[in-house]
Image: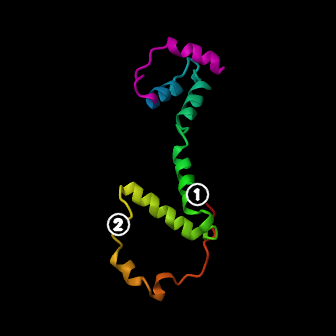
Amino acid sequence: MISRDSRQIHLLKWTDTKNTKKNWNEVLNLKDAQGESRFEELAPFANNLLILPHSNADVERLFSSMNFIKNKQRSRMKINLQTAILRIRCGLRLEGKCCYEYEIPLNILKQIGTKDKNDSSEEDDFIL
């Protein structure tokens, strides 16, 4: 049915072919004389294709960062520290800053060397 629809779709005049999302929504909403969807399989299929990511580069970048953070020398690092380091790296990258340019907030500097810095002995129960 999709192949039949794909052969017939070009026979109709569409209002907005420049905007892909609007065009496929128009195709999805097109009804025949009986009120049934004219392209009932093709339009949802095309809309599903539009939501697929174009590449997995972001995921690969994240795994690469994680491999850099947790190497042979740091193999016993706990998940909460790994997550914190990864968040810091990603956060700085999003802001376009380097670790040398980051200014540590004063309240954090005051906590260094005190018991207040990390009173929690609980482990995070989440998994990356």
The structure residue drawn at horizontal position 57% and vertical position 70%, both measured from the top left corner, is: 80
Residue 102 image label: 2
The structure residue drawn at horizontal position 46% and vertical position 60%, both measured from the top left corner, is: 89
Question: Residue 100, percent across and down?
Answer: 35, 65
Outermost residue, top side:
11
Outermost residue, right side:
1
Q: Quick one: 116 or 36, which is closer to the camera?
A: 116
Q: Measured along the vertical axis of the image, is residue 1 above or below residue 80? A: above
* Quadrant the C terminus occupies: bottom right
Q: Report which residue position mark 1 lands on.
A: 67
Label 1 neighbour load within 10 Å: few <14, some 14-19, many 20+: few
Question: Residue 12, percent across and down?
Answer: 49, 14
Give the extent of the magenta segment.
Answer: 1-20
Q: Quadrant of residue 7?
A: top right
The structure residue drawn at horizontal position 57% and vertical position 34%, both measured from the top left corner, is: 48
Badge count? 2
Colour convention: rainbow
Disc 1 to disc 2, C-alpha distance: 23 Å
Q: Is residue 96 left or right of residue 56?
A: left
Q: Measured along the vertical axis of the image, is residue 76 above or below residue 90? A: below
Q: Measured along the vertical axis of the image, is residue 114 above or below residue 59? A: below
